Image: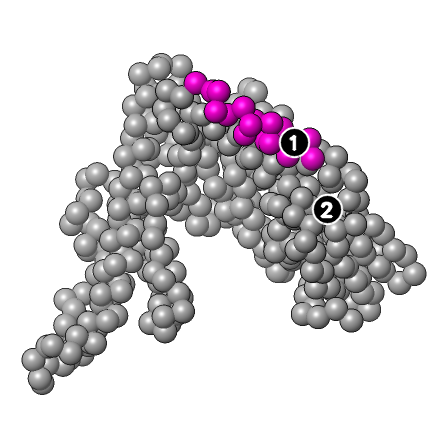
Amino acid sequence: MKRVVLTRKIQLLVNSEDAQIRREVYKTLCQWQHICFKAANYICTHSFLQERIKDMIYLAEGVKVKLSHIEKDADGILATSKKNTTYQVLSANYKGQLPTRILSCLNNQITALFQKEKADYFDGTRSMRNYKKDLPIPFSNADIRHLEVMDNGDYSFSFFSLPLRTYLGSDTTDKKQLLYQLSQNHLTVRNSSIQLLNGKIFMLLTIEQPQEQHQLETGIIATASLATDAPITVSISADQYAIGSKEEFLYRKQAISTAITRMKKGASFNRSGHGIKRILKNVTHLQKAEQRYIQQKLHVYSGRLIQICIKHKAGILVLGKEPDNSTNELLLRNWGYGSLKDKIAYKAHKAGIQLIIATTNE
């Protein structure tokens, strides 16, 4: 049976009534995230140096340099395996400051990503990754312990002896169901992480589960096109559907855009206190609200498209090329057809629908 990988962003709280304990746990997570940020850049730089050491033309003639274990290769210069070199560096610098399992997960993720992208680095077609301070703290399946349901429907667990719990609120997605299956050991946690962002704690939970089973037929083909009048138009045999409309989408978007313009005009009269950031605080808040509104609409439209395909048992979805509407700045600001395609591809794969993306319009 085919399996799919899902990622859910879940807010976390410190599971304690003691304010001092809450502060200590948050402080510990902040320190761990800061160490992960430094260690990730350390790994990336160290890996790049290892790969390019053979290009140091100023080394003495006759020097043979090969990145392999000296016991396995006479020309090798490493006292350990290549993958273990970066872990040894991290262990020497950060052992005791961060759990070693986190260091191991971080090392595996960064080195795997470096190996995947190194050809582009050396060709000059891609710059090296620069990891920022909000880099999440990676963890493995064994690091979440004592996952139990609470009286209010949330879940409590221990993360390296730190007491944490989920905050699901009025969640209408499948997070509660996934957490329940995880507590019953019916699902497998993959490369997940915990991130501190804007004073809040989030868990980026990545799990693997069986692919949804639907009665689909490869002989039934759905054709979807992207436009500005109707975000998605889908045709299946003689049936045609328009998902969303320009007026419905612009109604709320124009209200937010007008409010942003109004806030910008009045920003010069705001109290500063902390410079330009304080003056434009309301503007920034509305700009983020606009972005969230767009993303929510993209999720709704892509979800409806997949539901229509499942209803008609369409096993293949052909997605046409987006039109050139660059002149309509009001509609296209923060509206990413690339993001819409990504969401459609993700949900189609989850439902077992084959997606074909056309490069030209017929």
Secondary element under disc 2, as helix, strand or loop, is helix
Mark 1 residue crowding within 10 angstroms, few (<14) / some (14–19) / many (20+): few
Which residue in the structure is indicated by mark 1?
A: 258
Identify the image quadrant of residue 162. top left
Q: Amino acid at mark 2?
A: Tyr
Residue type pointed to by label 1:
Thr
Asked whether 260 falls inside the magenta stretch, the response is yes
Q: As rendered, which of 165 and 36 lies closer to the eye? A: 36
Q: Is residue 197 above or below residue 2?
A: above
Give the structural element (helix, strand or loop) at label 1: helix
Residue occupying the point 33% across, 26% down = 25
Quadrant of the rendering where the C terminus is positioned: bottom right
The residue most toward the left is 60
Q: Earlier in the sequence, mark 1 or mark 2?
A: 1
- Looking at the image, the residue that sits furthest to the right is 238
Q: Nearer the viewer, residue 180 or 284?
A: 284
Question: Relative to the observer, which residue lies in front, 32 or 118?
Answer: 118
Give how far across and how far down residue 226 sits, in percent.
74, 56
Q: On the rendered structure, is 257 left or right of 12?
A: right
Tell me the magenta residue range.
254-271
**Rendered location of residue 277, percent (x, y):** 41, 29
Main secondary structure type of the part rendered in magenta:
helix
Q: For the N terminus, give its image quadrant.
A: bottom right
What residue sits 73% from the left and 39% below the top?
A: 250
**Residue 37 versus residue 82 in the image, above or below:** above
Q: Is residue 146 visible?
A: no
Find residue 300 and name its label. Answer: none
Q: Which residue is mark 2?
A: 301
The picture places residue 62, in percent across and down from the top left corner, at: 9, 85
Task: State whether residue 353 is above or below residue 196.
Answer: below
Regarding residue 162, the answer to whether it shows in the image is: yes
Q: Nearer the viewer, mark 1 or mark 2?
A: 1
